[in-house]
């Protein structure tokens, strides 16, 4: 029995080696460099940097605004995916391609546009600011711009799953006596839920690392409206490289843990389907 | 509960799916809608279910008109070809779905689901998800789900179409027995005439949105209304010939005993493979000289493919295995083909 290790798909060692090399060059090595640089700090120095009031408030702002933006995206993205899959209307293809725009547009442009729209004499701001709604240079603005940058993820994960659901499944539910609302809550939504979680995780991760748009839309005041990525850049400008990487490392570990948790949740909900 | 369909038409764009179809399904019978794809059989089933609204005509359940009633209010059980199970729900929840949306109390749902699990012989698998079941098991779950709310009518759209041959036969026999037990008026769609004949009390043959023939399986098989039905119900040999009031005259066959026909005006004659026989020598008997080119066993019979030496046309003869052995027929042998029975149809049904 020779060659009994041969696989129907040849080239495993080559393609795996190739992927691992690229993964190392592009992801693992830069990330470990980040860890190594952080390691030049003593535990105490690191604690001072990471545990300072300013850093903590930056973390909490970053995580909370990325989280809220991802939640909003989950609702909006589901809505848009639903409309794109379920209905035929003029301009549908245009709308479909518009969804990806936030990925192509430099996010700094988005940040600039948002802040200029929502400032006191901006197009929206002139009506909103007198009502007490500060769109620019506020938490609201940060969340809003993160919704923009994270928008495509939920749409693009939910859309194919919705498309895949056969009409017969809904017809079966209807014929068994389910109302339209019951079809949605008991059939469609649970089927789409794992994809919705994936999209949420992606939008959330995108929000955590977002810099370009946030730096323009936020007033970046330490302790108040300074996001973690902005703080990292601020530290870099002070030539405090180790401190910058320390903040980044914590951000990295926290994001990784949260994404892992979401993945577990997703696997759990998928296992049932 | 009986079902009556009166003059139902349905059109999809330019495609006339159903063209003034009328039929009656007596209460408690099992009826097969048989036809090639595009014949409108599924559309007819969906109209009866309420999943499709006809452009014209009426549907009656017993004496009550339901044409405009939604599928939800008709209390029918429907089984889809590709099962359409809810993949995020267990077998138990799939079967109980119709009961839980109708707000049955939990204990009653559990009781009914267990009854059905027993009926489909899947006890112990109620906690599985559909993707952990085989095709046959999934279709049984789909059936149990359709029966859960004790529907007055059970409709099945090519229920065994996606299964492999062996499971298909097992399941259709099981369906027949099940029907004999519960006697719910049932209609099922199929393109497989064996399946229709094996299971149904009545067969409805459709083509191009119209009913070609309906009746008990034996009647439809013995007396096909036209060439289409004859051809659709099984392989058939087509010969050129003439016929008179005394019977058909097939070119080459000098004397064929067939059904005498009046108003004859066709030159196409149909002979079923088992209405032909093979002899070693013609010896002046009416028949064709042929050469055996292929022999294929098919269940209880053997199909002998021959070539007519005269016209080079292909002829198919079915005979039993013992006789084939006895005669010592092998590929390449030259033999005589003699007819036992032939049928003639008028030209507007020419194939």
Image (cartoon, coloured by chain):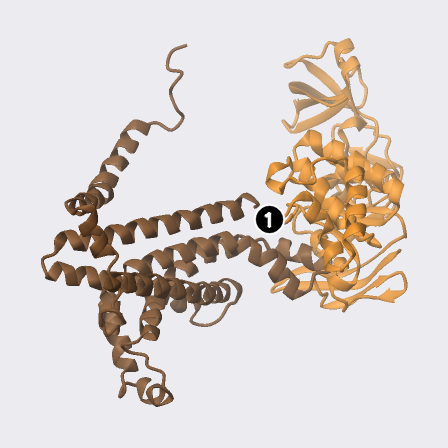
* Residue B235 shows in this picture: no
Figure colour of chain B = orange
Q: Nearer the viewer, residue B78 or B239?
A: B78
User: In the image, which lettered chain appears brown?
Assistant: A
Per the image, the residue denoted by label 1 is B88
Residue B58 against residue B349 in the figure, above or below: below
Q: Nearer the viewer, residue B78 or B263?
A: B78
Q: Residue at x 36, y 83 (%)?
A: A133
**What x and y, as percent, mark residue A247?**
23, 55
Quarter of the image where one finds residue A147 = bottom left
Front residue of B43 and B37: B43
Q: Chain of mark 1?
A: B
Task: Give the residue at x 68% y 15%.
Answer: B334
What residue appears at the point 27 percent right and 37 percent down from the top-left corner?
A: A19
Q: Could you tell me which secondary element the residue under label 1 belongs to?
A: loop
Identity of the residue drawn at 88% across and 56% down:
B2
A223 left or right of A7 in image: left
Q: Is residue B34 left or right of residue A239?
A: right
Horizontally, residue B268 falls left or right of residue B88, namely right
Looking at the rendered image, the quarter that the N terminus of chain B falls into is: bottom right
> Is residue A233 shown to the viewer in this render?
yes
Please state, as top left, top right, bottom left or bottom right, where the C terminus of chain B lies in the image: top right
């Amino acid at each position: 029995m020779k060659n009994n290790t041969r696989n129907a798909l040849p080239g495993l060692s080559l393609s795996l080696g190739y992927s691992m090399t690229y993964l190392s060059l592009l992801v693992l090595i830069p990330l470990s460099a980040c860890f190594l640089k952080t390691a030049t700090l003593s535990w105490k120095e690191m604690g001072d940097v990471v545990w300072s009031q300013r850093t903590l408030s930056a973390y909490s702002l970053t995580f909370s605004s990325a989280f809220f933006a991802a939640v909003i995206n989950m609702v909006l993205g589901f809505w848009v995916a639903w409309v794109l899959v379920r209905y035929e209307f003029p301009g549908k293809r245009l709308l479909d391609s518009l969804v990806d725009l936030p990925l192509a547009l430099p996010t700094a442009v988005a940040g600039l546009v948002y802040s200029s729209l929502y400032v006191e004499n901006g197009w929206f701001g002139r009506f909103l600011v007198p009502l007490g709604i500060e769109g620019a240079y506020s938490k609201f603005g940060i969340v809003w711009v993160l919704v923009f940058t994270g928008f495509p993820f939920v749409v693009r994960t939910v859309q194919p799953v919705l498309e895949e659901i056969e009409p017969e499944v809904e017809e079966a539910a209807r014929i068994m006596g389910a109302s339209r609302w019951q079809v949605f809550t008991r059939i469609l939504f649970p089927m789409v839920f794992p994809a919705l979680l994936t999209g949420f995780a992606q939008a959330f991760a995108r929000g955590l690392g977002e810099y370009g748009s946030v730096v323009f839309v936020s007033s970046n005041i330490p302790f108040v409206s300074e996001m973690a990525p902005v703080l990292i850049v601020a530290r870099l400008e002070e030539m405090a490289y180790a401190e910058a990487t320390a903040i980044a490392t914590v951000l990295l570990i926290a994001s990784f843990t949260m994404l892992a948790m979401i993945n577990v949740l997703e696997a759990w909900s998928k296992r049932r389907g | 509960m009986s079902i009556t369909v009166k003059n139902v038409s349905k059109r999809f764009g330019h495609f006339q799916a159903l063209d003034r179809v009328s039929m009656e399904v007596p209460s408690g019978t099992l009826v097969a809608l048989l036809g090639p794809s595009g014949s409108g059989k599924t559309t007819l089933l969906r109209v009866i279910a309420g999943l499709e609204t006809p452009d014209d005509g009426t549907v009656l359940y017993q004496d009550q008109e339901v044409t405009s009633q939604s599928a939800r209010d008709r209390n029918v059980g429907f089984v889809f070809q590709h099962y359409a199970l809810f993949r995020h729900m267990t077998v138990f929840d799939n079967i109980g779905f119709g009961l839980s949306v109708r707000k049955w109390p939990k204990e009653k749902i559990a009781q009914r689901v267990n009854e059905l699990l027993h009926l489909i012989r899947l006890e112990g698998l109620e906690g599985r998800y559909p993707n952990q079941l085989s095709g046959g098991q999934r279709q049984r779950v789909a059936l149990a789900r359709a029966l859960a709310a004790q529907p007055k009518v059970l409709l099945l759209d090519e229920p065994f179409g996606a299964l492999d041959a062996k499971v298909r036969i097992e399941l259709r026999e099981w369906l027949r027995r099940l029907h004999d037990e519960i006697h719910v008026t049932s209609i099922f769609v199929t393109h497989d005439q064996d399946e229709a004949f094996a299971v149904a009390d009545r067969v409805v043959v459709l083509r191009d949105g119209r009913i070609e023939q309906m009746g008990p399986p034996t009647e439809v098989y013995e007396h096909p209304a036209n060439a289409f039905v004859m051809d659709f119900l099984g392989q058939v040999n087509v010969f050129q010939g003439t016929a008179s009031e005394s019977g058909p005259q097939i070119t080459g066959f000098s004397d064929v005993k067939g059904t005498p026909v009046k108003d004859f005006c066709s030159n196409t004659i149909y002979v079923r493979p088992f209405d032909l026989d093979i002899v070693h020598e013609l010896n002046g008997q009416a028949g064709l000289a042929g050469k055996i080119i292929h022999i294929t066993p098919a269940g209880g019979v053997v199909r002998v493919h021959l070539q007519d030496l005269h016209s080079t046309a292909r002829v198919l003869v079915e005979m039993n295995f013992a006789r084939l052995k006895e005669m010592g027929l092998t590929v390449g042998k030259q033999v005589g083909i003699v007819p036992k029975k032939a049928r003639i149809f008028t030209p507007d049904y020419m194939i």
